Image (cartoon, rainbow, N blue to C red):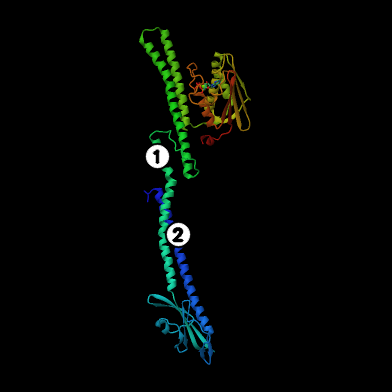
Amino acid sequence: MKNLTIKTKLTFWYTFMLVILLMIFSAFIYISMSNAMLQGAESLIKAHAAQVASIIEVENGNARFDEPFELTTSGTYITIYNSDNSVIEGSKVHPIITDMKPSFNVVKNIEINDSIWLVYDQPIYDNNVLVAWVRASRSLMPVGEALKNLRTVIFVAIPLCMLIAIGGGLFLSGRALAPIDHITKTARAIGRGDLSRRLNLPNIKDEVGNLATTFDEMLDRLETSFKKERQFTSDASHELRTPVAVITAQAEDALAGNRDMTSYREALETILKESKKMGNIISQLLMLTRGDEKKYKPVIEDIDLVMIATEVLNEMEGLASKKNVSLYLDSPNELHAMMDQTLITQLFINLIDNAVKYNYDNGWVKISLSGNKDKAYISVEDNGIGISDEDIPHIFDRFYRVDKSRKSDGTGLGLSIVKWIIDIHKGNISVQSVVGKGSKFIVKLPKYNGEEDLKA
Ligand SMILES: Nc1ncnc2c1ncn2[C@@H]1O[C@H](COP(=O)(O)OP(=O)(O)OP(=O)(O)O)[C@@H](O)[C@H]1O
Ligand SMILES: [Mg+2]
């Protein structure tokens, strides 16, 4: 049974159930019919006997009948006996019936030559003295014939129904399950690495249709995430290859010939700068990968966003002063929330770093903090180069940079980390920007996230 196909199992089960039901139904019909016919025959001979008895009159203790009557009425045979059991008048029936001793008011079954006869005796009394009696008898042959016909119909009908059920069942379940074969084949093709395959079944809203649609949707998501994964790996290798190439070139150059101390120093400085950059990329990548694998467990504690923003601004002062960018903070005295301090610090660093980096000389960056009962709002605004409408949807993608030339020393991971930090805190971020005028990043974060909620 285990190795049978669903098609066979389905057909087998419902044919089995159908046959059982048909058998129960047929047995019920057969039994009810035979009871009804038997009772009909019994009532008939009783009625015939009573009818004949009613026209017999008793005179001086003797039976007399003036009215003529039928000795055989629609299959019932009538015989009239004297009280001494001698026949007065009667139709010709089998001697066994004629000679049988009377037993009044009960219907008896007698078997003669393989056929059953019903016999009924009705007494006729005169002042409580038996003067005569009427015997009605009737063969059950017609009832037997009718029941035999019914049996034949049942025995032909059940196997016929079974055949129709099997045929119809195989056909219907075959049709209904055909798309499953298609799904299996496609899944196999996908197993061999072809993620572009789709079922593309016509849009039928039955169970299999829904399965196929869900399957195609799942494939869409899988393909997208595979593509992203591939893109991510290739971008990561690309980003790492450049500093490695610079380091190698610098080291080879330095080792090639006798150089003075200054050029060695310069080479080492470049090597250090590139190594730091590589280290930075690697730690950012690690952070994102751990986030993807849901391995990062946020440490949720009471933090003061104003304090963190102030610290980050102080650290950024050096970077900003290189371009003469002014940093402002607009905030209440303190703004407490339950969040992960390390991550929120990183969020400020990444957003302020961008606002400074993508700013003009002598520009400004304004950080505003506010909050209500259950939300904290952070906005980082600058009057820098701005982002075009086409780029805005992509800036949170990993490795996405508007300026793809190596002029900007970013790797394009900063905002994807910001996005991840916001997701982990169940918040959201929006961007408003005008090219050449500036950008504003607005972050909304729930203030009180239970640690359990954040892990979910
Ligand atoms: N405030 C901003 N003004 C103008 N452009 C911005 C701003 N912030 C981000 N961008 C654009 O979005 C891109 C992605 O930013 P993201 O912070 O993710 O990467 P990055 O700054 O290039 O590199 P990283 O932050 O990893 O050093 C940037 O390269 C830049 O083109
Ligand atoms: Mg950045």
Label 2 belongs to which residue? 21
Residue type, numbered disc 1: Lys
Is 331 drawn above or below residue 114 in the view shown?
above
Label 1 belongs to which residue? 185
Q: Residues within 10 Å of mark 2 (few under 14, many from 20)?
A: few
| Apparent side of residue 423 relative to residue 98 in the rendered image (left or right) | right
Q: Which is nearer the N-term, disc 1 or disc 2? A: 2
Q: Depth check: 66 or 193 in front?
A: 66
How far across and how far down the image is residue 431, in percent? 57, 25
- Judge whether residue 253 can be spotted in this image: yes
Quarter occupied by residue 14: bottom left
Q: Residue at x 44, y 24 (%)?
A: 236
Q: Residue at x 42, y 9 (%)?
A: 263
* Residue at the extreme front of the image, as rendered: 68
Secondary structure of residue under mark 2 = helix
Q: Is mark 2 within 8 Å of ligand 1?
A: no
- Judge whether residue 10 can be spotted in this image: no
Is 400 drawn above or below residue 147 in the view shown?
above
How far across and how far down the image is residue 112, in percent? 39, 78
How far across and how far down the image is residue 303, in percent? 57, 28
Residue type, numbered disc 2: Leu
Q: Depth check: 142 or 120 in front?
A: 142
Q: Depth check: 80 or 248 in front?
A: 80
Q: Depth check: 275 or 40 in front?
A: 40
Q: CA distance from mark 1 to mark 2?
A: 38 Å
How far across and how far down the image is residue 329, in percent? 61, 21
Q: Residue at x 47, y 73 (%)?
A: 38
